[in-house]
Image (cartoon, rainbow, N blue to C red):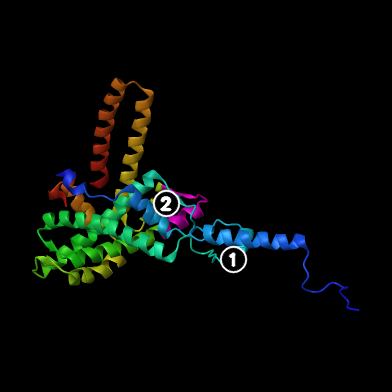
Amino acid sequence: MSLYGTRKPREISRGSRRCIVFLRRVCVCLYFVARPFVFYENFSPISCIILNFAGTEVRQTVSMDEEERTAYIQRLKAAVHYTTGLICRQMEEEKEVQFTRQTIAAIAETAFKQCEIFAEDLELFSRHAKRSTVNVDDVKITVRRSKPLCDFICQKSEELAAGQQEKKEKKKKTTGKGKKRKVHIESDVSESEDSNML
Amino acid sequence: MEEKATSATFKKETVQRLMSLHFKDEKTKVSNDALILISELLKLFIMEAAARSAKQAKTEENELVSIDHFEKILPQLYLTPSYTFIVRASLIYDGVFDQKKI
């Protein structure tokens, strides 16, 4: 007499067979449906296990496919390159020189790398302040090392704040009164620019 | 003249995507004002690099700014991020700074 009873080892009940067939079908469906989706990070652990069972590779670390990521980076670099080209063209007119294509490409690449440094610093500062949104203050801290740059950024932020303030006041007051205030504030801002940089 | 100096800027969306690409946490966002400031920073960086390369080329009596000139100014650009050169230049351009006072 065997310890496990008289049942044959391979004999499965009809109910459990149906379950297995159902699961197999689910996995096949998931294989064909879920495979094109590339955002793997948001899946719960259980669904990851099911997807793994179905044969899809679940990657928790990257949110995009490797190829898509490189294509995305290429597009961004191209955008940076375009704006760099425009800025260099303006420089050419000012300084009366000619920039080679390789130089513009090199400057664009360097600017792209600089973005990474900025982003890292900004994220760290905002995280330290227990915020999830990068603020103007974070930007100010990032440029604190260079005094003229810091002053420039502070000045710009004040202009932005003044512009927003004036928008708010415009909404509150009537259009006629709002225009008078705008002229008054603009003259104040230009005067403060002079006093800051002298 | 003022418009000429400031016409080429980064689009907000580009800067937003650039920042999000390098953020370690996907939930980190950038405020609107901060985006404007970051695009200004990037523009200044590029202007600084271009102006220093142009100056290097001029000291070598060359009208064509090649990659060698850029390579020469690159260490100093990173070690001493004093954007005095460009900030003053842009202010002269805007007519705020009196040239005699520099």
Q: Which residue is mark 1?
A: A52
Task: Classify residue A91 by image quadrant.
Answer: bottom left
Q: Measured along the vertical axis of the image, is residue A161 above or below residue A112? A: above
> Where residue B93 sits: x, y (%)?
16, 48
Q: Measured along the vertical axis of the image, is residue A174 above or below residue B69? A: above
Secondary element under disc 1, as helix, strand or loop, is helix
| Camera-nearest residue between A35 and B57 | A35
> Where residue A158 sits: x, y (%)?
34, 41
| Camera-nearest residue between A77 and B80 | A77
> Do the residues bearing badges 2 and 1 touch, measured as CB atoms within 8 Å?
no
View extreme (right): residue: A1
Q: Residue at x 50, y 54 (%)?
A: A127
Circle nearer the viewer, 2 or 1: 1
Q: Residue at x 32, y 59 (%)?
A: A75
Q: Residue at x 45, y 63 (%)?
A: A65
Is residue A132 magenta-colored? Answer: yes
Q: CA distance from mark 2 to mark 1?
A: 41 Å
Q: Which residue is mark 2?
A: A138
Q: Which residues are magenta?
A: A120-135
Which quadrant: the N terminus of chain A? bottom right
> Where residue A156 sits: x, y (%)?
31, 45
Q: How many marks?
A: 2
Q: Measured along the vertical axis of the image, is residue A179 above or below residue A21? A: above
Task: Classify residue A48 by image quadrant.
Answer: bottom right
Letter of the chain that mark 2 sits on in the rendering = A
Going by the image, does B98 lie left or right of A76? left
